[in-house]
Image: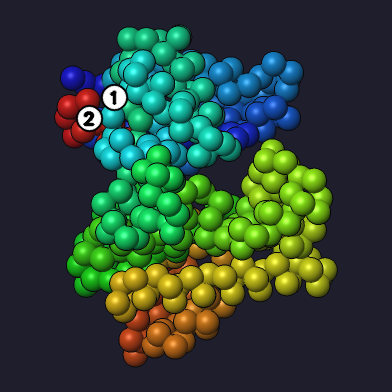
């Protein structure tokens, strides 16, 4: 089968898009529709970063389905008669049944829709994009690639909560997320840091969503996210881990129901909630509000504490890798986190860190530290090509 692979990564207010040669090879185009529901606009650039398409639409009636159609039409135009041989999607939750990428059919859609309560901010949008293409272009095969899949082979104990067995057996367990990002970074290690490829590594995926993954010999051992993508680290608008008693208190004292608590934990907490200023680390760094500084300090503190937890799960750590928006671009955050990890024997090379070099630890550091850019879309393209049997 010949052709190109399109990749869609649908979020709550945007859909990222990329077009690759089959096999997840050269990236031909990349862009996104953002501002869905508010100020929808499309921007796409070619493999050299040059803009090739820009459009905007009125907000009214322009939902994820409309955005998907716009991206599909644009992909056809950009392809210039070269067929789209398949479309891959990042799907946040695969549950216990889907441990590998899978070609989507009606049964798969039903199964994945049933998991929407476990990822309410992501799963419905992931599936809306898939359904829109099934309706508009049913002849194009689609592949779902799961953020949970990388973690499904963790040790059994790492996946358990201390709950009655009937609840665990019903699917309430630790799943872990950001798996496509961790998988991509792990696959890069033999080229970037071969000494770590078979070692014990903590990968810090730090962006608006944030988590840590303990990786040993290329496999996930533990992840700070659990049953949902709200557990673990403090994030842009998500609280991270809380004492469950806080939720009971909120229900009793504030009369909050499930939806109000969901809104609080997913959209009004994290950096935004603590600072009262913004969920964007850049805005917080620029602010002179003491609450903004405290939000950043809490973000760093929680990461350092959880690095200790993931290092324990590994029985020691050989390397720390920073990735995603904050991890790749915020040198100050990397320096603050590294300072908190001095007990591990981590010594930062300040000049290399400021320059955003690959290796940012000093020559005498017992634990090496690295910046490795992630590429979830390329990982999806590779999986999609493999499932569809496309040539690389």
**Residue count near mark 1 (Cα–Cα under 10 Å), binned few <14, some 14–19, many ≥20:** some
Label 1: which secondary element? strand
- Quarter in which the C terminus is drawn: top left
Residue 10 got which mark? none
- Residue at image position (43%, 52%) is 164
First-in-chain label (2 vs 1):
1
In the visual, does 292 lie left or right of 351? right
The answer to which of 229 and 364 lies nearer the viewer is 229
The x and y percentages for residue 17 are 47, 32
Residue at the (76%, 67%) spot, across then down: 292
**Which residue: 67% across, 33% down?**
35
For the residue pair 112 and 61, the one nearer the viewer reads as: 112
The local crowd at label 2, few if under 14, some if 14 to 19, many if 20 or more residues have their Cα within 10 Å, is some
Q: What element carries label 2?
A: helix
Q: Where is residue 290 in the image (x, y as percent from the top left)?
A: 81, 72
Tags 2 and 1 touching, CB below 8 Å: yes
Numbered label tally? 2
Of residues 262 and 355, the one drawn nearer to the viewer in this rendering: 262
Q: Distance between the residues labelled 2 and 1?
A: 7 Å
* Image vertical order of residue 193 relative to residue 125, above or below: below
For the point 32% across and 27% down, the residue is 143
Task: Point out residue 67 in the picture as x, y percentages from the top left corner.
Answer: 57, 22
Relative to 188, is 39 on the left or the right? right
Circle 1 residue: 103
Displayed quadrant of residue 315: bottom left
The colour scheme applied to this rendered structure is rainbow
Dot 2 corresponds to which residue? 387
In the picture, which quadrant includes the N terminus?
Answer: top left
In depth, the one of 260 and 136 nearer the eye is 260
Residue 308 seen by the camera: yes
């Amino acid at each position: 089968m010949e052709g190109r692979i399109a990749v869609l990564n649908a979020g709550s207010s945007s859909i990222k898009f990329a077009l690759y040669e089959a096999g997840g090879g050269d990236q031909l185009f990349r862009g996104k529709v953002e501002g869905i529901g508010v100020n929808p606009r499309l921007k796409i650039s070619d493999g050299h970063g040059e803009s090739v398409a820009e459009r905007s639409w009125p907000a009214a009636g322009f939902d994820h389905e409309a955005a998907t159609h716009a991206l599909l039409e644009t992909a056809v135009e950009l392809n210039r008669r070269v067929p789209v041989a398949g479309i891959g999607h990042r799907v946040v939750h695969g549950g216990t049944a889907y441990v590998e990428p899978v070609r989507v059919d009606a049964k798969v859609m039903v199964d994945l829709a049933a998991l929407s309560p476990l990822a309410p901010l992501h799963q419905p949008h992931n599936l809306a994009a898939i359904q829109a293409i099934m309706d508009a272009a049913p002849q194009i095969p689609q592949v779902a690639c799961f953020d949970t899949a990388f973690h499904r082979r963790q040790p059994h104990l790492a996946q358990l909560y201390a709950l009655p067995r009937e609840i665990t057996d019903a699917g309430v367990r630790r799943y872990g997320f950001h798996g496509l990002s961790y998988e991509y970074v792990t696959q890069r290690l033999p080229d970037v840091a071969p000494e770590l490829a078979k070692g014990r590594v903590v990968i810090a995926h730090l962006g608006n969503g944030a988590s840590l993954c303990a990786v040993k010999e290329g496999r996930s051992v533990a992840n700070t996210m659990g049953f949902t993508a709200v557990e673990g680290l403090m994030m842009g608008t998500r609280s991270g881990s809380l004492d469950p008693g806080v939720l009971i208190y909120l229900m009793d004292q504030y009369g909050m129901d499930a939806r109000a608590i969901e809104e609080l934990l997913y959209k009004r907490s994290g950096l935004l909630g603590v600072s009262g200023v913004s969920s964007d680390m850049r805005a917080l760094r620029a602010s002179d509000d003491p609450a903004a500084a405290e939000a950043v300090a809490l973000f760093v503190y929680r990461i350092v504490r959880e690095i200790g937890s993931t290092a324990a799960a590994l029985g020691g750590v050989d390397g720390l890798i920073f990735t995603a928006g904050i991890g790749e671009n915020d040198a100050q955050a990397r320096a603050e986190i590294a300072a908190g990890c001095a007990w591990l024997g981590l010594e930062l090379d300040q000049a290399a860190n400021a320059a955003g070099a690959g290796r940012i630890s000093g020559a005498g550091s017992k634990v090496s530290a690295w910046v490795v850019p992630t590429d979830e879309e390329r990982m999806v393209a590779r999986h999609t090509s493999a499932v569809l049997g496309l040539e690389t």
